[in-house]
Every structure is written in structure tokens, then in C-alpha cells.
Amino acid sequence: MLECRKMIALVTRNTKCYFKDKFTFFMSLITPLILLILFVTFLKNVYVDSFNKISEEFGIEIAPRVLNGITGAWLMSSILSVSSVTVAFCSNIIMIEDKMNSTINDFNISPVKSTTISISYFISNFFVTFLVIITVMLIGHIYLAAVGWYISVGDAFMIIVDCICGILFGTLLAGIVESFISTQGGASAVSTLVSSMYGFICGAYMPLSQFSEGLKNVLAILPGTYGVGIMRNHYMNGYVNEIVKNITEPEKAEAMIKGIKDAFDANLYAFGNRIPLGAMYGILLGTCAALIAAYVVIVIMKSKKKK
């Protein structure tokens, strides 16, 4: 019970330290918000044209509200899945600052277990990242409601579940990588690298269907790709169903659904085989389990080093 109270106190302290600097919170929000603004102002027509080409192949006209909504939903799935990882690396800065300011040394000589200290950083980072992602989600959903909302209650709930899975993956990855960093320069380098590359290697900014077969197979090995894939499915389901609801021929409707999902990565393929949605969850959560094991090993090693 005493150790639990210490944990709560440390989590509260870490979270307050993060939100104490309003600029830090703003910087966590700025990247996803910039992506949303860039989409609305510059990139929207690119995705609209892509959906129109698919609809023309099937001789179907997509209503403007559905078209605007599905393009926005596709982008929201990209922003949230990427930000779940990139924001986690930024919001974990408290752990690095404690090492830079030697605050961690004060913790180490206090009657608090090093495992408690390490886990408190993880819980605080998860909580902070969750708040940032939910804020971005709400802003994005306001936009979708304005241009065209066709997301069911079930899919909306699963989108939150998908965010939690993505945040868990991002928080664990950030905790492991940044546990070896103790300088501002190192933290900036890692955050910049992750922010600039992650969205491309997981297929969030450009559909994997646009890549070569060999590159698609390589990227299919990365668990982050499936974090994007599960988000795509729940964001696009309602819109795709709305597009095909007036198609009387079942085969044509199925072909249309497959064409859209293949083109925009709701369907993912590895070495020619389609990965079911359940398998996507299995790969992502299995990776999280492996990362938890690695994080526990690091925490135990630090605990022994303290002794």
C-alpha cells in the first residue's frame, strides 16, 4: 500500500511537471494539428481524386458529403496512429530531464524502489499521451461531423480502443529507447528521427499499395503498420458501407469494398496474403507484450545497479 502511494505521488508529479510548461504541451499537439491543417488546405484534393478514380472504375458516383468524410477519416486514421508513437517520444521528456538535472539521483537515494520510479514514468507518459491523442481526436471529429459523419457508435468505440493499443505500443517503445538517453541533444535527435520517419515506414502518409511489392513485404514485418491498419478499418467502415449501400449487385458491392480497402490500406497484405483484422491486433499486442518483457528486464537491471 505504501509503495502504491509512492507510485501515485510520482505519477502525479511527473504529469504536473509536463503540463507545467504549456509550451511543451503545445508542441506535442502542433505536429498532428499541422497535418490536419495541411490536409484541409492542400492535400484533400489528392485523396478526393484517388477515391473518384476508384468510383469511376465501378461506374458509381460518391456523394460529396461521403467523399469529404471518407478522405478526412482516412487522414484521421493516419494522424492518430502516427501521433500515438511520436507524441509518446515527446511527452517522455520528463524522464530525460530528470537525468539531465540529476533529479533521478535524489530519487535513487530516497526510500523509493527504482522499479516504482521507472513504472511511474511509463504510467505518466501513457496518461499524457492519451490526453494529447484524445484532444486531437476531438478536433478531428468536429471536422468530420462538419463535412460528413458516417462512423457508427461501435466503430467510434473501437477507434478509442485502437488509440489505446497504439499509445501502449508507443509508450513502451519510447520508454525503452529513451531509457538509454540522458542528454537534450540525444532526446531531440531521437524525437526528430521518429517524427520524420515513422509515418512513412508504417504506411500512414502514403498507402502501402503505392509501394513496390518488395518494400510492402518489408514494411509488413513492422508492427506499427498494423497499428495504422486497425485504425483504417474502423474509420472507413461506415463510409465504405454508405458508398455501396445502393449497389444492387452483391458481387459488384464486394469488389468495390475490396477495391477501396486495398487501395487505402484497410486491407493489408504480407507476401501476397491478406492479414485479417484479428491478426493485426494479435501482431500489435504481441509486440506490446514483447516490449513489456524488455521494459521489465531494463527496470530490473537498473534496480540491481542501484543496489
Image (cartoon, rainbow, N blue to C red):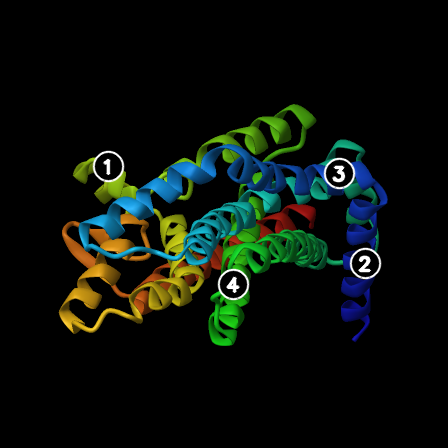
What's the amino acid at mark 3?
Answer: Thr
> Which residue is label 3 attached to?
24
Q: How far is mark 4 from mark 1, CA to CA?
A: 34 Å
Q: How far is mark 3 from mark 4, CA to CA?
A: 32 Å
Q: Pointers 3 and 1 in contact (CB under 8 A)?
A: no
Residue 93 appears left or right of 270: right
Mark 3 / mark 4, whichever is N-terminal: 3
Q: Residues within 10 Å of mark 2 (few under 14, many from 20)?
A: some
Judge depth for marks 2 and 3 and give the one in front.
3
Mark 2 / mark 1, whichever is N-terminal: 2
What's the amino acid at mark 4?
Answer: Trp
Identity of the residue drawn at 16% across and 49% down:
271
Looking at the picture, how far across and down is residue 34, in whole percent? 60, 36
> Which residue is label 1 attached to?
215
Residue 296 visible in the displayed image: no
> Which residue is label 4 attached to?
149
Residue 199 appears left or right of 94: left
Looking at the picture, how far across and down is residue 114, in whole percent? 70, 54
Kind of element beneath mark 2 = helix
Looking at the picture, how far across and down is residue 164, in whole percent? 55, 62
> Which residue is label 2 attached to?
12
Viewer-nearest residue: 122 or 141: 141
